[in-house]
Amino acid sequence: MILGTLVAVAVPLAFLALVRWLDLYASGSFQGVLVCLGWGITAFWLAFLANTLALGRVGFVLLVLLVAPVIEEALKSLILVYYVRRADFTYFVDGAIYGFAAGTGFAVLENLLSLSRTGNEVGLAVASSRAFSTALMHGSASALVGVSLGRLRFGRGASRFGALLLGWAAAMSLHITFNNVVNRNAGVLTPVLAVAIGLGGVVLIAAFIFWGLRQERRWLRETLGLKVGVSAGESAVVLKLDDLDRLLAPVGAYFGEERRKRVETFLRLQAQLGLKRKVQELTPDPKLRAEMEAQVSVLRREIDTVRRGLGVYCMACVRSILPPETEPLWVRLGQTLETRPRSSGSNLWGALGERMNGEQ
């Protein structure tokens, strides 16, 4: 039973970590993931009460096959309706991850309740089956609502309500299909189909995330530049974050692993800055745009602080990793010799020598 409990909790959380890891630009906050995870746990208890009340009115079969999926998906998604209107919600990639987190919180508690009603001899089997089927279905269904809301986040008027209805329809359809499949007496085929639906849902959400990342990469090409304090060389590396380990290998070799990690943080902050600026342009709500402007200012200050901490030679190395083909040599030279104000009596070689000593 102890091993079954561990599987019932750890496997859904591991898939949540995997889904969040797919977010290359880490635009969704870790705090938001935790909040949605906690809401999923709360939604489970609310759904448990609602399903108990509905049981006496509709009967067990109709409850399981139709009513419960509608109740549960509506309750799980309420946190997404709240988050989609926040300034720190960037795009539907965030919605997919937040939704998967809410569904995971719900599924973990449902797994534990189901496990408490089974005997010790079959506890591990039940936990494993549910962890790779029911839990993943719950996460994927809620993520579909997040994708729909995030995809039409920049719409006006009735389109936002349409996005919510579309997301609910997709999530409830998946949930209803799953419940009908697992409650049919199809012998050994039933658990196989259940796991297939669960894993298929995760694959679908991953496909949505990759689709969203391609769109976000296009946004970064439009927004990253000197207007937001990002040089052309830095921007070129930001657009290749999916190959960051290889690209930053020279930085680690010359400046150490600790500074390489700080460079990675620096580049991800720049990506978030570019995405935030694009979302700010697309947001029709003036109040929300003002809140996002405050976030942009905070990101700029944080980026400047990290850049100064990395030092001029480390930043020169970063900018030289993927120098843009259209960038003139003298522009790159000017970026490399990024300096603080000097007195008129100082000489170039002396200043460079002082900086080299400072970098050691």
Image (cartoon, grey):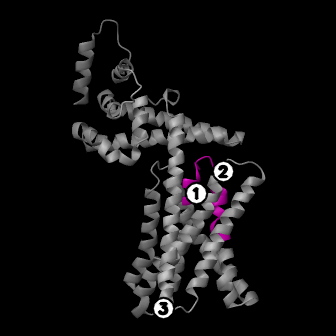
Q: Amino acid at mark 3?
A: Thr
Q: Earlier in the sequence, mark 1 or mark 3?
A: 1
Label 2 sits on a secondary structure element that is: loop
Residue 332 rendering spot, x and y as whole percentages: 36, 23
Q: Position of residue 54 (x, y in %)?
A: 72, 84
Residue 76 visible somewhere in the drawing: yes
Whole-percent x, y for residue 336 in the image: 34, 23
- Left or right? Give the position of 167 relative to 129: right
Q: Residue, x 27% and y 42% (percent of image)?
A: 249
Q: Circle 1 — which element?
A: helix
Residue 306 in the figure: left or right of residue 182: left
Provide the residue span drawn in magenta.
73-96
- Which mark identifies residue 118? 3
Of residues 133 and 310, the one drawn nearer to the viewer in this rendering: 133
Position of the C terminus by quadrant: top left
In space, the residues marked 3 and 2 are separated at their CA atoms by: 43 Å
Q: Nearer the viewer, residue 352 or 38?
A: 352
Location of the N terminus (image quadrant): bottom left
Q: Point out the residue furthest to the top here.
A: 345
User: Disc 1 designates what residue?
Assistant: 95
| Residue 75 lies in quadrant | bottom right
Q: Which residue is mark 2?
A: 153
Asked if disc 2 and disc 1 are in contact, CB closer than 8 Å, the reply is yes
Identity, as a three-letter code, of the amino acid under mark 2 = Arg
Q: Is residue 61 above or below residue 349?
A: below
Q: Which circle's residue, 2 or 1, is located before the other in the chain?
A: 1
Question: Which corner quadrant of the image does residue 6 belong to?
Answer: bottom left
- Look at discs 3 and 2 and give the one toward the viewer: 2
Of tags 1 and 3, the one toward the viewer is: 1
Q: Element at badge 3?
A: loop
- The local crowd at label 2, few if under 14, some if 14 to 19, many if 20 or more residues have their Cα within 10 Å, is many
The residue positioned 62% from the left and 54% from the top of the image is: 150
